[in-house]
């Protein structure tokens, strides 16, 4: 018969993190740790970042107030956060990222979005982890999050001992790099918390120098308004004209800061088969991606993180990439076929692309 959480002794609580780590590993999580809930220093950085307007049009970042940095405000009774990690680097299952970026006729999709959407997959696994904990300790308070609520997931993962926050603002594990998803279980269990590891970025500034749009304005400071991941995914309107050439062939997200990080030479391939590339998205020609009608988009992005973008913004992004592609009859034909699109957003980006190829529209 399981103990209720309020009946657990200190020795039992001290043993529980190791048990949780083992159960999490059985569910496919590559690392697990326990974090406390004092994020006061991170809260100051968040408030300053918002005040500087660096969140762009992600208004939800400001609307949630300080719930993001105060776990017990988001879920009353929270004492600890169980932070988990799941690797997604596709390895040899995908066309090499550098090869795609060097081929301006092919659309580049961020490695995390090549396979199935991680949100549901990880949330289901976290629920199973909570069930397993409950079998051992009895009823306890918890809630699972995977990019589904105002959570400072990287700060919590750092405090759980899963890595340090690099100069590109991603979490880095010295043994595994940064190609992984994060998820959390907020809980009322008074578990012993881990320790944040030391920062090992040193003098390296590879990520800062590699950013195509100079969005990493200083070490550990990202201006989302210049970030290609933000512009091609979160941003609802026109991509700023001055930044479009730097977008290159990136049609969904950007990985440049991670691709150059020396710690990623240790990154393991994803163990989860669902993260393998689907529908040829690791090697699809831009003209084919631009030819998708809305039904095609819905079909090819079913179960994918790309689905949330919507067809209109997908066409916006591919139009920019076609504007940056070499001028060929096929590229010009593809753009002209969309020049009368009912969306103002699509038409404007198509016109820009045609201008780049010195073509009438």
Image (tube, rainbow, N blue to C red):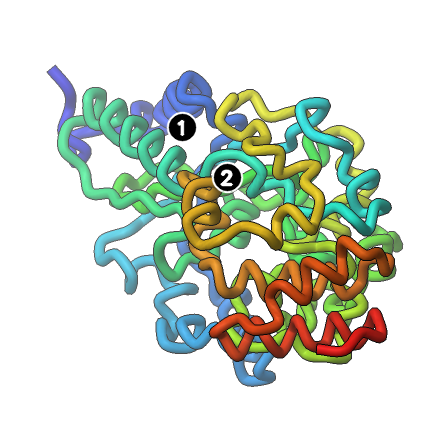
Residue 189 x/y as whole percent = 27, 39
- Depicted 265 relative to depicted 218: above or below: above
Q: Which is nearer the eye, 250 or 226? A: 250
**Residue at coordinates 59% horizontally, 52% vertically from top-left?**
291
Calculate the distance from the C-alpha at mark 1 to the C-alpha at mark 2.
10 Å
Name which of mark 1 and mark 2 comes first in the sequence. 1
**Residue at coordinates 48% horizontally, 26% vertically from top-left?**
274
Which residue is disc 1 drawn over? 17
Q: Which is nearer the eye, 96 or 65? A: 96
Residue 141 x/y as whole percent = 20, 43
* Disc 2 crowd, CA 10 A, few/some/many (<14, 14-19, 20+): some
Location of the N terminus (image quadrant): top left
Q: Quadrant of residue 265?
A: top right
Q: Quadrant of residue 64?
A: bottom left
Location of the C terminus (image quadrant): bottom right
Residue 253 x/y as whole percent = 63, 54
- Position of 298 with respect to 230 (left or right) is left
- Depicted 176 relative to depicted 52: above or below: above
Say whether residue 87 is visible. no
Which residue is disc 2 drawn over? 194
**Numbered marks: total:** 2
Disc 1 to disc 2: CB gap under 8 Å: yes
- Position of 190 with respect to 213 (left or right) is left
Q: Quadrant of residue 94?
A: top right
Label 2 residue SS: loop
């Amino acid at each position: 018969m399981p103990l209720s959480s309020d009946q657990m002794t200190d020795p039992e609580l001290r043993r529980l993190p190791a048990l949780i780590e083992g159960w999490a590993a059985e569910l496919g999580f590559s690392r697990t740790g326990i974090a406390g809930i004092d994020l006061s220093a991170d809260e100051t950085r968040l408030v300053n970042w918002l005040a500087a307007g660096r969140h762009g049009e992600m208004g939800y970042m400001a609307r949630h107030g300080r719930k993001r940095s105060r776990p017990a405000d988001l879920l009353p009774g929270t004492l600890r956060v169980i932070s988990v990690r799941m690797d997604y680097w596709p390895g040899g299952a995908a066309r090499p990222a550098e090869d795609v970026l060097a081929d301006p006729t092919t659309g580049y999709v961020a490695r995390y979005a090549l396979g199935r959407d991680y949100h549901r997959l990880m949330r289901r696994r976290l629920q199973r982890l909570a069930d397993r904990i409950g079998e051992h300790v009895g009823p306890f308070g918890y809630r699972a999050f995977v990019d589904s609520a105002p959570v400072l997931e990287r700060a919590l993962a750092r405090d759980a001992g899963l890595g340090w926050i690099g100069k590109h603002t991603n979490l880095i594990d010295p043994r595994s790099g940064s190609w992984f998803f994060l998820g959390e279980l907020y809980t009322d269990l008074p578990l012993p918390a881990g320790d944040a590891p030391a920062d090992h970025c040193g003098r390296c500034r590879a990520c800062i120098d590699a950013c195509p749009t100079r969005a990493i304005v200083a070490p550990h400071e990202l201006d989302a308004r210049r970030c290609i991941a933000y512009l091609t995914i979160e941003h609802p309107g026109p991509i700023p004209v001055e930044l479009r050439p730097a977008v290159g062939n990136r049609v969904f997200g950007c990985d440049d800061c991670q691709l150059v990080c020396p710690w990623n030479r240790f990154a393991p391939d994803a163990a989860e088969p669902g993260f393998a590339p689907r529908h040829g998205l690791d090697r699809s020609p831009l003209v084919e991606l631009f030819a998708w009608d809305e039904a095609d988009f819905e079909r090819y992005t079913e179960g994918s993180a790309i689905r949330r973008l919507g067809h209109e913004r997908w066409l916006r992004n591919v139009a920019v990439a076609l504007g940056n592609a070499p001028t060929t009859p096929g590229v010009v034909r593809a753009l002209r076929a969309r020049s009368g699109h009912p969306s103002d957003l699509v038409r404007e980006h198509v016109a820009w692309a045609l201008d780049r190829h010195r073509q009438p529209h």
